[in-house]
Amino acid sequence: MKIDIITIFPEFFDTFLKTSIIKRAIEDGFVEIELHQLRDYSHNKHKKIDDTPYGGGVGMLMAFPPFYDVIHKLKKENSKVILLSPQGKLFNQKFATELSNMNHLILICGHYEGIDARIEALIDYEISIGDYVLTGGEIPAMILSDAVIRLIPKVIHQDSAAEDSLQNGWLKYPQYTKPEQYKGFKVPDVLISGNHQLINEWRMKQQVKKTMEKRPDLLKQIEMTEKEVKLLKEFNKNQK
């Protein structure tokens, strides 16, 4: 996969690209990430890329021509152009999985009061990481990149990715490690029983329970098996 990131603060990504899974994915050739300084495409001799909005208003707006030029330079037949924006579709694990199967992503990081609205004619997706406003699109671009890259085959162990929270719609079951007991806090007996069938059943029950308790809003989006529907009904009955 190739990811091109358009930004006025490329230095923002220095640590991100040199750390942990992202660093290994780049070194192993699973992903190529290139940063593009928007000011290099400015039509202004002082490299200015913003101006006052037509019709008046507070703040400065990022100009359209630099984005037009850099996108047309980078875009290929299989490219998907993504604008990171609080007005976009809410990003989730399902969307991350969809994007991980694409060959080329172009991420646009806005700033100031936003970007000239003509940018919408050039994008394939407008994506939000949450219902709040940040100073710029750099942090959302890193979040999206991280979520997508870890789903690329062989970047991490596929069994690990498959069991992540939200990957199948449910939150992940509780997990424990050594020691077995500490200051009265004990690991559930089933997990040290050695009975893998019982462990799998316990985990399924726990992921249903945890999702119901912590994120009931997710339940409407999950395509449940008959067993999961039965477990959910049992938990609901016990709560009454």
Image (cartoon, helix red, strand yellow):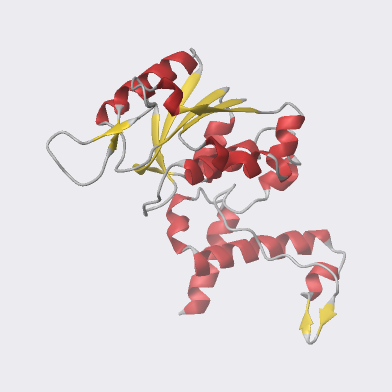
Quadrant of the frame with the N terminus: top right
The reply, left or right, for residue 71 in relation to residue 5 is left
* Spot occupied by residue 152 in the image (x, y as percentages of width and height): 66, 33
* Spot occupied by residue 122 in the image (x, y as percentages of width and height): 35, 22
Dividing the picture into quarters, in which one does residue 111 lie?
A: top left
Residue plotted at (53% across, 32% down): 99
* Spot occupied by residue 139 in the image (x, y as percentages of width and height): 50, 46
Q: Is residue 3 above or below residue 227?
A: above
Dividing the picture into quarters, in which one does residue 89 lie?
A: top left
* Spot occupied by residue 9 in the image (x, y as percentages of width and height): 49, 38
Residue plotted at (75% across, 37% down): 24
Q: Residue furthest front?
A: 46
Q: Nearer the viewer, residue 7 or 129?
A: 7
Q: Residue furthest bottom?
A: 184
Residue plotted at (48% across, 44% down): 140
Q: Is residue 92 above or below residue 117?
A: below
